[in-house]
Image: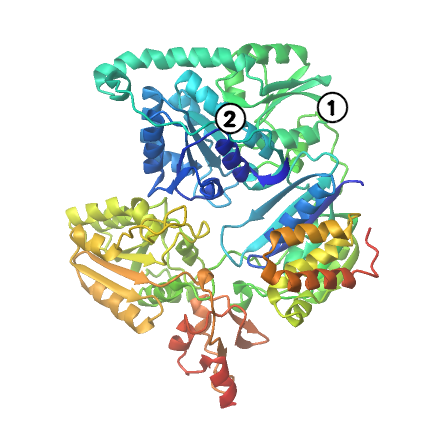
Amino acid sequence: MKKRDLLMVGMGGQGIVLASDILGEVALAAGYDVKKTDTLGMAQRGGSVVSHVRIADKVWSPLIKEGEVDLLVAFEKLEAARWSYYLREGSVAIVNNQSTPPLSVSLGTHRYPGDKDIEDTLKRWAGRVCFVNGTHKAEKLGDLRTLNMLMLGCVSSFLPIDVDIWKDCISQRLSPNILKMNMAAFDQGREEMSSANLR
Amino acid sequence: MKKLLSGNEAFALGAYHAGVMVAAAYPGTPSTEILESIARFDDIYAEWSTNEKVAMEVGLGAAYAGVRALVSMKQVGLNVASDPFMAASITGINGGLVVIVADDPGAFSTQNEQDTRHYAKLSKVPMLEPSDSQEAYDLMAVAFEISEKFDTPVLVRSSTRISHSKSVVVTNRSLVTSAKQASFKHDVEKYVMLPVHVRLRRPLIEERLVRLTAYAETFPRNHIFWGELKLGVVSSGVAYQYAREVFPNACFLKLGMTYPLPQNLLRQFAEGVERLIVVEELDPFLEENILAMGIKVAGKEFIPRIGELNTGIVEEAGHRAGLVAEPSRRKIALPQGLPGRPPVLCAGCPHAGIFFVLNTVGQRSKLLDARGKAEEEGKLIITGDIGCYTLATYPPLRAMDTTACMGAGIGQALGMEKAGVGSKVVAVIGDSTFLHSGITGLVDAVYNKAGVTIIILDNGTTAMTGHQDHPGTGISAKGKKTEAVELERLVRGVGVDDVKVVNAFDMKALRSAVRSSLDNTELSVIIVRGACSVRLRKRSGHRAVDMDKCDGCEVCLRIGCPAIQKLDEQVCIDATLCAGDACTICEQLCPKKAIGPLTAVGESK
């Protein structure tokens, strides 16, 4: 496999760090070298969160270079736009169809970008932008908090790694009483991407 | 065995496998998880100390007693701990003492950006630097060996990127050392630093440095990787990884020990290459020390000395220095005009209510409205320090005027008052920071008859760094129940007469407590108590807005609660974020009584 640089972005509290942790463990289990790092504004909820995951035969820097991301996984639309400058030409963006306006928007000092703006921003570099109704689907599965496993299911369609490895790693990290629901979310994510052929 | 570990987890496992017996720390990003990880090992004593100075003293005591001890902190923590740390350098140790200090280049979560390597030179102790989790793991055994061999504490410098990145670790050791029995050997000339003994030990420190410098020459983790001889790169820490990616064909001298430096090895490397550069994060520490050896070297003339490095920055710098071709990739243009998403006080945060009161009583909202117009003065000055509550600096609360370091707000308030600032001064401080170093400020305020108000925001945890316990919570770092320090008794005990304890979610009580304290010309303390909302297990009674009653006055938006949003000109409450019955601040503040439990509001329609 060629190198794969993945950026997972969203907001504090969405489970991005756990999802990228599992992604890293999947890559390790599949025999690759892997480095991952989370850059958080502060150790607080609600801020912008970004996780870098680098998978290759040998990885040096834990941080991905701007303009080099192969797959952007955004848990929220504004965050997708914010980190779009990391995308390389012809890359892929998977975007959860959720808008959460930050306080500055609620207070009326800033405007939340429209869907068209967001798509155009991503399309400047991404060869392909896939919107996913992740939040809605996760809610339907019974718990919003399964969104991260649903997004991970989407990511699994992007990497040539056997699905059993994914499920093993997820089982090891989640407690048994929430595993079933999260596994369903993971499968839902895979299904969302089934026709996309992202590899 | 292969594992994916963060640098902090790797430090902990490496120290455990090296037979560490005692570990002490105060939580601070990015160092927190070192102690958290080590506390999970049953056979190690691990504690959250009240501050880094105490942690250092605990570690030093354990080391004097002959066992291996680990002390960890963030970079500004070493400033607090520097007194016992400098003492440790001169007394030396007995069992190994390793001090991990995590720098924060880029100041992601710190009031400062400082390069801990200078402390190695100041204290004349060795400095080790890992460049990934594997080295973080490996270096622990090495660090303890050096510490014991040379009778010195050993500094290990991490950084946010090392501490919080995960990379693959092959664990090659398991716990083999049988638990060493602690025992103390009386030696007053070594451990009692009376001036007469200091004079005896001072030359030993210089001799130790000479021996360490010789050792650095053969230190196996100072390693040369030969490549094309046109360029030689000296690097350490995570900067090495970026440099390796940008200059794939160059020669590298990777330094695992960055103080003292291996002079002969550096000369040999410099002579072997046509051009020599240093790639290092923050200060030109290596560069200046290499220049002082008379070796021609460059670095900071093209590599930034401010902020975190990354591959892109090193590549740009390499291009400016004529070392690599111009990066061929497209020019990066940042998306413009997007609203920021700074961290905010959480929905249901127990600090929101009191800050709203301080904002309104101090008429600070009016200043926000008048921004750019009248130059008005607020009615209150609010001094603070480091914790979640520092986030109340942002609009709409705007209820914080100073943040210097942990515990500083109380002394600052006293200083302002004594300087005759005119306005009433209020110091706000968290429960954990109060115990960390606010208490000495409080004693000073009592002793010097300060007329300020001190508000202790007691949410029962160290929330900002991820809910670590502290002496006020009655739970140890190992999760065991222990004696809890009761803040009100403590405050009364040092001599404060006016002490009030108020429920953080009772707006009326908060307002009257603040008013009464502000009227008091003598020292007063208000303890505002309410549990951190992130730890709220069960949420019920989510609030909603009755649109028939809402007149759009937006008072509720002034709380800065992230659950209260304005969408399409209507205020609404996000039920998934709302803390409900546990909070109700918005309900208490709404002038039109338009906010209530979701069910009640639904019924009224």
Whether residue A125 is visible here, answered yes or no, is no
Between the residue at mark 2 and the residue at mark 1, the CA separation in whole angstroms equals: 31 Å
| Image coordinates for residue B442, horizontal then vertical, percent | 23, 49
Q: Residue at x 45, y 78 (%)?
A: B553
**Residue, disc 1:** B249
Colour mode of the rendering: rainbow
Q: Looking at the image, is B506 positioned above or below residue A21?
A: below
Q: Looking at the image, is A90 positioned above or below residue B213?
A: below
Residue furthest to the front in view is B178
Q: Residue at x 63, y 63 (%)?
A: A146
| Image coordinates for residue B276, horizontal then vertical, percent | 63, 18
- Return the residue nearer the eye: A64 or A114: A64
Task: Inspect the image, locate mark 2, and give the three-letter code of the amino acid beneath it.
Answer: Ala
Q: Quadrant of residue B232?
A: top right
| Label 2 residue SS | helix
Q: Quadrant of the N terminus of chain A?
A: top right
**Residue, disc 2:** B141
- Number of numbered discs: 2
| Mark 2 vs 1, N-terminal side | 2
